[in-house]
Image: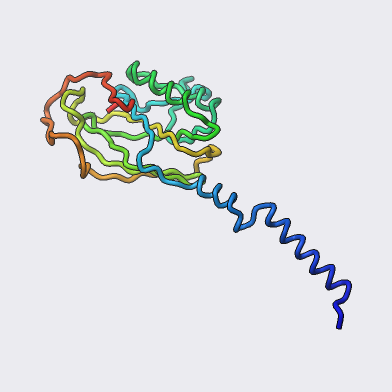
Amino acid sequence: MSPTRRSLLGSLSFGALGALGGCLGGADDPESESARRRVSGTEPDPTVLKVRNPDGETVLVDGSETNDEGEPVSVGRELVASAARAADLLVAEGVADAARERVRSFLDETDYDAETVYVARAGVESCQRLEIQSVSWDPGHVEYEYCRELRPPDEACEADTRVALGLLFRLPVALDGRLTGSGSSGHAPCQTTGTDYAVIDANATVPGNETAIDEGGDSR
């Protein structure tokens, strides 16, 4: 029995839809898979700026928003996805001048067509520092791993005192700015370290250089 006109039309319609689905980017489309890989990823050696504020509770504030006292609102964790948003971010009072300049340069030099800055706020003991070991991201979610160790003895610190630490990660992907979740995990001490010291006297204040910044641009 020869096929009916209706069945032939149905077969043609199915074929056309299948071809159209391939053009729109189906599950097997290499370009779609490539886009998914770019959205989710891990950077084992991230570009990150670490900035201390020994005199305040935050490193970055939002210049476009104020609280009831008319002061800029502190920035906790955020994905900075555009130069316009980066321009809204200001460095809080108490941050050293050299570090303030590095923050501004870091934000201004980011290519927001291909990169995103992830901002996180952390607290750390004055005589300790964080070593960032990796950062990972998925749509709307960022996590980083770190270890904690003592700062070099020639850098300023005060025992039993906590300071505000701001972390600015430059992610090698253009994200849309939505942040629905974030996290971090770490341990102390760092398992591999180049330091040859292990103890700072608990009652000591180490004078050091208050504006010391390492070669990578991170305040230790």
State which quarter of the image contains the C terminus: top left
Q: Quick check: 104 left or right of 201?
A: right
State which quarter of the image contains the N terminus: bottom right
Q: Position of residue 13 (x, y in %)?
A: 80, 64
Find residue 49 and report its image quarter. top left
Give the number of callouts.
0
Q: Is residue 66 positioned above or below 30 on the image? A: above
Q: Position of residue 149 (x, y in %)?
A: 21, 37
x 48%, y 36%: residue: 79
Q: Quick check: 177 left or right of 20?
A: left
Q: Quick check: 76 left or right of 30?
A: left
Q: Quick check: 61 left or right of 132?
A: right
x 41%, y 26%: residue: 60
Q: Is residue 196 positioned above or below 22 on the image? A: above
Q: Position of residue 152 (x, y in %)?
A: 18, 28
Find residue 58 and report its image quarter. top left
Furthest-bottom residue in this view = 1
Q: Foreground: 171 or 81?
A: 171
x 32%, y 41%: residue: 133
Q: Is residue 19 positioned above or below 86 on the image? A: below
Q: Position of residue 199 (x, y in %)?
A: 12, 34
Q: Is residue 192 positioned above or below 96 on the image? A: below
x 22%, y 33%: residue: 128
